[in-house]
Image (cartoon, rainbow, N blue to C red):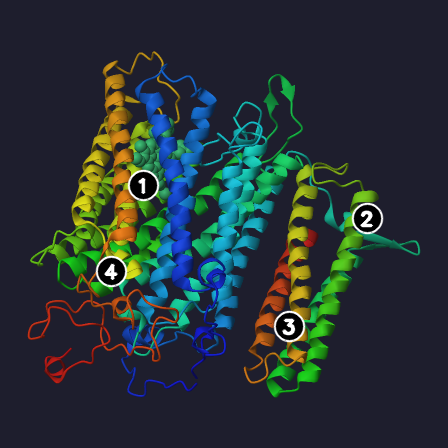
Amino acid sequence: MQHVALADRPDELHDPQTFITKYVWSQDHKVIAIQYGSTAIFVGLIALVLSGLMRLQLGFPDTFDFIDPNSYLQFVTMHGMIMVIYLLTALLLGGFGNYLIPLMCGARDMVFPFMNMLSYWVYLLSVIILLASFFVPGGPTGAGWTLYPPQAILDGTPGYDWGIILMLVSLAVFIVAFTMGGLNYVTTVLQARTHGMTLMRMPLSVWGIFVATILGILAFPALLVSAIMMLLDKTLHTSFFMPAVVSLGENLSYEGGSPILFQHLFWFFGHPEVYIVALPAFGMVSDVLSVHARKNIFGYRMMVWAIVIIGALSFVVWAHHMYVSGMHPAFGFFFATTTLIIAVPTAIKVYNWVLTLWRGNIHLTVPMLFAIGFIFTFTHGGLTGLFLGNVTIDLPLSDTYFVVAHFHMVMGVSPIMVLFAAIYHWFPLMTGKMFDERLGKWHFWCTFLGTYAIYLPMHYLGFLGVPRRYFAMGTTDFIPESAQSLNAGITVAALLVGLSQLIFLYNIFKTLRSGEKSPRNPWGAASLEWQTADVPPHHGNWGKELPQVHRWAYDYSVPGAAEDFIPQNHPVTEDEQTEGH
Amino acid sequence: MSIETDKNATYTEPGVAGVVSDWAADKQAFDMPWGKLMMWIFLLSDTFIFSVFLTSYMTVRISATDAWPNASEVFALEIAGVHLPLLLIAIMTFILITSSGTMAMAVNCAYRGDKKKAVTFIVLTALFGASFVGMQAFEWTKLITEEGIRPWGNPLGAAQFGSSFFMITGFHGLHVTGGVIYLLWVARRVSTGYYDGKGLEIVEIAGLYWHFVDLVWVFIFAFFYLW
Ligand code: HEM
Ligand SMILES: [Cu+2]
């Protein structure tokens, strides 16, 4: 029996009438996507400024009075948390998930638009709570984005009072928002696809977002519960995570809790979180590569299964973040093994991206440049991950700049590369206008080369033993002075990369104001989102009739076809059938 | 609005490939309204929340340095001079399980089209739920005022006893309270005819939530009161 989606019921699909219902309290997934996206980019810019401040301190110590050790720690924490949660998770799932799922699956909207709208407003609330912590007594928390107790809530850590409370509350609120959106994404993919759109015909973008959302739905509970317990430890002086502590010569009232429990819970969330940002990126980059190489994605089925397998495995590797916590060596062995097993499906994906390019008709457009940049940065970050996944190699490298370099390459820069690729790629669809290619290329080369200028030297600093989360290196025997000049160089590169993002913002705003109209389907993409009744699509997406899907999303350069791509909603011709498609 | 099914779609591949293509079905993967699937997925997420709560409880119970209080004595009632361990909690559990029964009746009536009876059973379920919360409030009061148990410590032994008890039963109690409100809201909408012509699946969806909250209670009961 077929069940009717809410958005398919004419009486439920309220056509927004006023400005407010159209653009503010909108239930349209495309508007919600743009609200999510712009809020995320806004907080992301704050995190970017914070990283610039940190780099200033590291590159030129004793120069800037307004950065002291406490504020440095606060910058580190807020930078890390904003980047991972409030920028990447929100932009990839709340932004692109919202925009692409209904359009690519051929639905009129998410299955439960009202809750989808609430999801955005609750997310905005969590952002406001987070930013409020800059203005409370003591400032934001400086516990590091991992928020490890006991130090996170004890005197001596900056922001141990209001800062940490607001951080935990904000995270809890974010999780509520994510769950409301996430339930929508998953259910829409499963139940609201159009005729002919089987799961195995969905574009990989949808697969990546879909599996990532499931990961979020199963992983965020661990963060929610640990946030609740830490809040209770902080406010009611329970001892879930707090052992007996002597602080400044004073016996605190805590006793008998388990700080290691927090680490386990945090990373049970934290590792899948890496894939929550990676899988949507994997999916979207596959689509961008295929479109701009005019060639079908290599090994579509393998790509889908790799996404699913990586998602499943990501729940059994979390303790590779805890090799130095003193756990039993047998656990270290177990988690090192599972970690290295994940490398297999991941490597398959990388091979398939490269093989998609091989003998393709590569158009070096701006989205394509970013997508190819991603293959580099991701491979690079993945290879250093193999080092850190092994217990014996991780022990000396743990908590050094090698780790900082690794995770920035693999989960900082790489998803950002894909985000830029995706923004440039779908910008004509979202706005109907074409951005300035030349500025886009400048933006790419500054970002891509700058990234390497920042993070390659950091690997070397890590080998020297320079520890992470340090305000200044001070005078240490084992770190040569040349490390400081390297740090200054990194800072210059980081500031240039930060500034080059202005090119991007300028390009966006300029195009929005006075950009030229884009052709309907400028890249010649076959997937459904470009086949809407209007471009940019209107409320309800498809006009009177839902599209009928006849093929997968990757029919590029099909021999004998009239054009070099065949949209998903074009019927299979007789010639094709005889060829056995 | 009529919905056509793809009549040409045949899935006859044997083995694993067949299973995959069945699941990859056209339009919808599960034969149920989206609301029901959404509730299932939410409950899956909620299962993880409660599992993490209970795992954490077990961990701190092991890491606690003081002795763990004897649950069956803490939760005993003294009635007419007779000492009855776990009496209140037995009654609470019984009530909650009964309410699952009335909820099932409500679903049955709804699908048979008997709106009146369905509403009656939903309201009855909500009343059972409310009385459960009432008794929980009584139990909390007794623990706090008579036994001196606080989240941060208690005279009987490990502080984690009170912390995890209040946290976990409190979180579950919030679920029950939320469920009562949800049920009353559904009952109202059913009786005012909001769902006429759309089907009464909502009753089953609310029922799923309610049964889940019951099931979780059985685990909390086992781990907290019987261990
Ligand atoms: C121009 C771009 C960026 C620069 C210059 C930058 C710079 C930094 C610096 C200097 C630190 C502190 C290192 C330390 O003292 O230990 C840091 C930490 C961190 N960054 Fe970035 N970052 C950038 C982009 C990103 C992005 C896109 C992400 C997204 C995942 C990210 C995630 C993190 C995390 C998770 C931490 C660790 C925070 C902690 O130790 O608690 N960063 N970054
Ligand atoms: Cu990890």
- Answer yes or no: are tags 2 and 4 on the same subunit: no
> Of helix, strand and loop, which one carries label 2?
helix
Amino acid at dot 4: Met
| Residue indicated by mark 1 | A412
Circles 4 and 3 in contact, beta carbons < 8 Å: no
Q: CA distance from mark 2 to mark 1?
A: 52 Å
User: Nearer the observer, disc 4 or disc 3?
Assistant: 3
The subunit letter for the residue under badge 4 reads: A
Image coordinates of residue A426 in percent, x first then y, are: 27, 58
User: Nearer the observer, disc 2 or disc 1?
Assistant: 1
The subunit letter for the residue under badge 2 reads: B
| Residue indicated by mark 3 | B186
User: Nearer the observer, disc 3 or disc 2?
Assistant: 3
- Answer yes or no: are tags 4 and 1 on the same subunit: yes
> Foreground: B31 or A19?
A19
Identify which residue is drawn at 23% across, 26% down.
Answer: A460
User: Nearer the observer, disc 4 or disc 1?
Assistant: 1
Report if the beta carbon of the residue with label 2 is closer than 8 angstroms to ligand 1: no
Identify which residue is drawn at 10% across, 82% down.
Answer: A575
Amino acid at dot 1: Gly
Q: CA distance from mark 3 to mark 1?
A: 45 Å
Quarter placement of the C terminus of chain A: bottom left
Q: CA distance from mark 4 to mark 1?
A: 22 Å
Circles 3 and 2 in contact, beta carbons < 8 Å: no
